[in-house]
Amino acid sequence: MIDIDKNEIHKKLSDTSVRLTYKFWNLKRAQITQRPSENEWCPLEILIHLRQVAEVYTERVKRLVNAKEEDSIPHFHDYDEFKMMENIDLEEETPKANINTFLDVRSDMLNLISFDDEIWETKICIHEVEGEISLRKLLIPLVLREQKFLDILEELLPE
């Protein structure tokens, strides 16, 4: 696994909100619903996916950060991105609603992780695939996933 320090994680998580808002600014529906191929997601589906992942990770961070010493260590299952997308009705989804939700949950997460340096390494969870990991290591896959999909959006929606 790639190792990223807490400052870089925080910066990248903060930047994603700005990049998503800017990327979807003033686009027509046809631009954001066109798939590059039959088996690939369109830009709107990528946005929905990023919103879903942000919600999942924010709930995990809340559980982890708010866990008391006497509580058992939180356990988290691996995330199945395709299963989450199965129930999406693209006709009912809008960039504005997804970005607003993303911004809300990202703000919640950043508030939880911004003020206490100790939590990055002392808050521990058990991940189904990764085993025992710290908050910092829990967030690295999120940062990498967001970067991957932001790069794809850059290709699909060039300036």
Image (cartoon, helix red, strand yellow):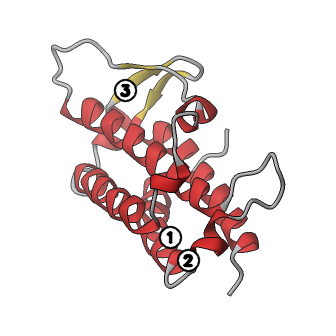
Residue 124, numbered label: 3
Which sits in the foreground, 34 or 124? 34
Query: On screen, 57 above or below 154?
Result: above
Label 2 close to label 3 by CB (< 8 Å): no
Q: Secondary structure at mark 3?
A: strand
Q: Earlier in the sequence, mark 2 or mark 3?
A: 2
Q: Secondary structure at mark 2?
A: helix
Location of mark 2 (residue): 23
Position in image of residue 115 (x %, y %): 21, 56
Residue at 39% across, 23% down: 125
Position in image of residue 19 (x %, y %): 51, 74
65 sits left or right of 60 in the view: left
Question: Is label 3 or label 1 in front?
Answer: 1
Badge 2: how crowded within 10 Å, few (<14), some, or many (20+)? some
The amino acid type, in three-letter code, at marker 2 is: Lys
Image quadrant occupied by the C terminus: bottom right
Location of mark 1 (residue): 20
Query: On screen, 118 above or below 72?
Result: below
151 sits left or right of 57 in the view: right
Image quadrant occupied by the N terminus: top right
Position in image of residue 88 (x %, y %): 52, 42
